[in-house]
Image: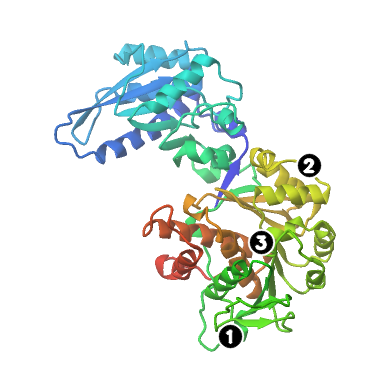
Amino acid sequence: MKSLFFDTRVLDDRIKNEFCLTEDILMENAAMSLEERIRIFCNSLNDKYLHKVDVLIVCGSGDNGADGLVLARRLKNKVFNNLLIEPCVFQVLSPKSNGCKTQRKRAEKIGVKFVENIFDAHIVVDCLFGSGFHGKLDKNMKNLIDSLNLLKGFKLACDVPSALDCAIKGEGNAFVAEETVTMGARKISLFLDDAKDYTGKIITASLGISDSVFEDTFTSDAFLLEESDLKLPSRKFMNVHKGCFGHTAVVAGNKKGAALIAASAAFRFGAGLVSLIDFSKEKSGFNVPSEFMISEFLPKNATALALGMGLGQENCDFEPYLDLLKNENLPVVLDADIFYYENLPEILSLRSRLNAKTIITPHPKEFAVLLKNCGLADVSSIDIQKNRLDYAKTFCNFYKNIVLILKGSTSIICLHSKKANCFESYFNPHGLSNLSKGGSGDVLSGLAAALLAQNWNAKAAAIQSSLAHALASKKAAQKFSSYALTPQLLIDEISLLEINFEQIRQF
């Protein structure tokens, strides 16, 4: 798990002021990291007719451009994998910062080639704008970025893809990188939903000191989840029985298939018992697998409840479910149609006040409806997407004992930390587009309910169910086409995570 930061300029200033690392040293380290990615790319080439690699470095007028100029100087006459590296600089804007002016002179002195136009190089490095750019692009810059994106070479971004902020705000395109080398510390902007199609693989570069020293005096309340953070409900002891692993109850509504998916996920994720609760009088066509129990009431020994998936929004009587949710001793996962119930805020207030274990798993549209019903914000799902973290913080600071999984291409697990008395967020960037299928969310709810049933705390259950869900999608991508994943195939992959991941730590 790594810290994420909104603004890393404070950290950069600390490096310079407290540790006496000059701008020159920082630029050399940044360029060294970019150079290493270029070396790795060149080592992957296997073309016996290729003798040199052209590297087009597109530079702006500030320190990001200066990093590019240092890179050009460092690459001059380098040989990687028996390939001569030929760097060329396209300086879009005349140097303005002192660092950029100095590095331009140095590059010229060593004989770096400067070009007047972009061209289809083997490698294209974006050093146009850094993370500090938050303005609007003029027409020429927009056209330039669009033209760079059309080039066929391997694309590498320095710090952040240029104009990423504009793309996130829906104000134009950004540079589309295959890799982004971000400098010093991880920036939250790189891990937002709208950034995912621009950043490519994200590599964090050292600027000359270790992460722990770099981030030591600046605590963060945002964290990046890594594959190594995965903790599964592994069964370590032998002298056990099904009652040791909890009883997950799943409410079946109008669309009973959703409940069956959640129940299957819960059973395959360690729950000792799974029951389906069906209040409806009409039960024809409801074929329940033999391993699940079916009841018209909440089983007395249930240790967690999943509610909302497949309830239906029209002509749905939510009242029968209220008493279930008022039970403070019953951990609950809420999903899907329950967010359209206008009186849900009262239930959330009650459960938050009683500190009852509660996880909610809305997607942006459902979250927008929930915020409106709670009286916290009247916004669209598009507004949510543009400001996911802000709206999540608004919700969690109001309902301080509710854990939120805000689903997206990068899901965010959010809560108000009682220990630190502040808002915390955990970013899960591992999910793939193969999850964009009906039923994927039902799987997630079942996983979370299974962990709650096994007496995990709500924060851990939310984080680990989200991680398992996402990492299973990665494993599935190695076997199936990107469009072929089904809920059952996803559940199958989740059931194999313990085998696939060698380093499993018992939670």
Residue 378: numbered disc:
2
For marks 3 and 1 on the same chain, the one whose residue lies earlier in the sequence: 1
Frontmost of labels 1 and 2 is 2
Amino acid bearing label 3: Lys
Q: Quadrant of the C terminus?
A: bottom right
Amino acid bearing label 2: Asp
Q: Is residue 213 visible?
A: yes
At x 66%, y 48%, the residue is: 364
**Of residues 256 and 225, the one drawn nearer to the viewer in this rendering:** 256
For marks 1 and 2 on the same chain, the one whose residue lies earlier in the sequence: 1
Q: Label 2 crowding class (10 Å Cα cut-off): few <14, some 14-19, many 20+?
A: few
- In the rendered image, residue 94, in percent from the top left (x then y), is placed at 47, 10
> Which residue is identified by label 3?
459
Q: Quadrant of residue 347?
A: bottom right
- In the rendered image, residue 271, in percent from the top left (x then y), is placed at 59, 77
For marks 3 and 2 on the same chain, the one whose residue lies earlier in the sequence: 2
Amino acid bearing label 1: Lys
